[in-house]
Amino acid sequence: MFSVFSKTTNAVTRRCQDDEMTKLRKKYDVYYHTFERQVGSRVWEDGKEMVMLSSNDYLGLSTHPKVIEAGKRALDEWGSSTTGARLANGSRGYHIELEEKLAEFLGKEACHVSVAGYISCMSSIQAFAQKGDLILVDRNVHSSLWSGIGLTQGKVERFAHNNPSDLAEVLSYEKPETPKFVVFEGVYSMEGHISPIQEIVEVCRDQNCFFVLDDAHGFGVLGSSGRGSADHCGATDDIDILTGSFSKALSSTGGFVAGSKDVIEYLRTHSKQTIFSASLSPVQAYCASASLDILQNEPEHLERLWANTRRYKAILESLGLDTWGSETPAIPIVLGSKERVYRFWQHLRERGLFTVMSIAPAVPPGKDLIRTSISARHTDEDFEKIEEAMAYAARRI
Ligand code: PMP
């Protein structure tokens, strides 16, 4: 009888079996952990209760009653899926409402929503860049932006992370008339650094630059009422494309690209990710929209997020831990080697904290770290546990 298990191996299956990254993942048994239950800031794995200290639910809205109610209403009103692309049969009134609401909130003329921040970031570059264009990119940008760049025929030049002088030097070798993209992030999620947006814009003056800013971790967190990093730096009008995700502060899934009307209309006909893929589902859109309303009408979540961030940073600093100069609720603990990170991760887990280990090549060599992030949802009781566990792990390391 035919069995798939007796099929002879081929080059690709052997590559999978011998893969070093997969072996590394199995050696450090820290990835793909599955929780059987979640209540507030707590998660359970094999019956063990832990404080979640590495989620992107910055405002803690994923269990807000209004968000849950909105998700249920979406199913009642629209069913589970549009089963089609925006261009074809998949456009709905709720997409337009969310886009208009977001554009107004962000201070841009227009907006386009998609099924993931990853997709929105890819579209922000793939839809616009052409052969002969130059793409200037901060070395530390997220994989989604690199994926978008990979789909273009533009020439790519990297500049040093958050370093306008290095960008100026790269620009000095280029012709001013060449169309250029400057691709960077508002908040770098591994480092917690805020981008010097004004300085970056300044060194690019008169250089024909189209600015693409991924604000996945600044949106809902920085600026007035959480409008994001560009607002925080007073540079909203300078940025051609503001892109971001619903899977962080807005506690849904999906993404957006905001810009001028002309730019967004162009994206709608040139983004392959939009034209050939089904649109944002009703539940995703309704939950993101409800979170956006809460962000604007209930400032206490944002206030608590920052109060918790200050409290958490003070704990880490009192223990002498290296937070890489993080200025945001995304706070790394840099330990410098895989083995140290692994031991630290285990000690935290033993004491009831769930965190995420980030090791090279995901971070620069020597910067292996534990990636933690604070939420408005963390309670006094959580902080007692966090303080005790961090002190224990710091002593043991
Ligand atoms: N950009 C950055 C900086 C991110 O950190 C992420 C997700 N981790 C994304 C884009 C992709 O967002 P999403 O999860 O919505 O696909």
Image (spheres, rainbow, N blue to C red):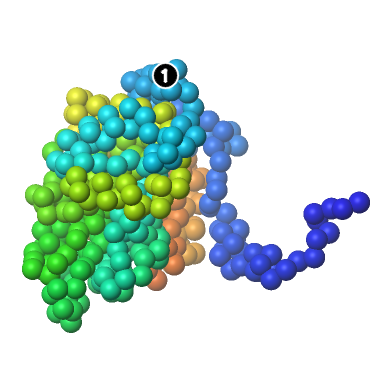
| Picture layout, residue 202 above or below residue 71 | below
Q: Which residue is nearer to you in this view: 227 or 307?
A: 227
Looking at the rendering, which quadrant does residue 207 occupy?
A: bottom left
| Picture layout, residue 319 above or below residue 135 | above
Is the C-beta of the residue carrying label 1 under 8 Å from the nearest atom of ligand 1? no
Q: Is residue 16 left or right of residue 200?
A: right
Q: Which residue is nearer to you in this view: 88 or 54?
A: 88
Residue 228, image x, y percentages: 20, 44
Q: Is residue 191 left or right of residue 54?
A: left
Q: Is residue 267 visible?
A: yes
Q: Quadrant of the C terminus?
A: bottom left
Residue 219, image x, y percentages: 24, 43
Q: Is residue 242 visible?
A: no
Residue 352, image x, y percentages: 47, 40
| Picture layout, residue 179 above or below residue 303 | below
As drawn, which residue projects farthest toward the right?
1
Q: Which residue is nearer to you in this view: 384 or 82?
A: 82
Q: Could you tell me the amino acid type at mark 1? A: Glu
For the point 31% across and 71% down, the residue is 131
Residue denoted by label 1:
77
Q: Is residue 312 left or right of residue 336?
A: left
Residue 6, image x, y percentages: 83, 59
For the point 40% across and 63% down, the residue is 151
Q: Which residue is nearer to you in this view: 344 or 332?
A: 332
For the point 23% across and 33% down, the residue is 100
